[in-house]
Image (cartoon, grey):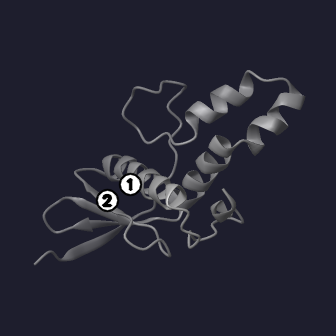
Amino acid sequence: MVQTIGYSGRCTPVDTGGAPDTGDYIVGYLLQEQVRQFSEADKTRAMDSPKALLDRYVLNAVRVASVELIEDGSYFAEIPGVPGVWADGNSESAVCRELDAALRAWLDLKIKHEDHDIPVIAGIDLNVL
């Protein structure tokens, strides 16, 4: 039996000084870089694109994830209100990266199968995609 021995915290973006290959959890980094390259008019259109909407959804969902330290030294994370999306890893940053990937895969299936039961997070409703 796995027993939780402590509450570790939440998944949060880490400022890596612009280095995307550091292994730190950097959800939103690529979107931020992409948006910086656009003019002001293009920024509005970029933020309304399906990819940008999905990225904002994932960023907000993972930010509210609960992360727990398990007695064997591993980490477990899940997003409240998003059934079946969870991850484990050997560090907080690893479990957050895995949770990000699990959520994106789950959303991909939900959208492809036109399931309209995706939870609204931070006012973002992906059920319209």
Instruction: Kindly report the distance in space between the C-alpha atoms of the residues bearing marks 1 and 2.
Output: 7 Å
- Whether the residues at callouts 1 and 2 have beta carbons within 8 Å, the answer is yes
Helix, strand or loop status at disc 2:
strand
Residue lying at 27% horizontally and 50% vertically, measured from the top left: 91
Residue at x-position 81% and y-position 37%: 45
| Residue 97, placed above or below residue 39 | below
Please tell me which residue lies in front, 117 or 29.
117
Q: Which residue is denoted by mark 1 in the rendering? A: 102
Going by the numbered disc 1, the residue's amino acid type is Ala
Q: What's the residue type where badge 2 is placed?
A: Ala
First in sequence: mark 1 vs mark 2: 2
Quarter where residue 77 is shown:
bottom left
Q: Which residue is mark 2?
A: 87
Q: Quadrant of residue 4?
A: bottom left
Left or right: residue 48 versus residue 54 is right
Image quadrant containing the N terminus: bottom left
Q: Position of residue 70 (x, y in %)?
A: 21, 67
Of 38 and 19, the residue lying toward us: 38
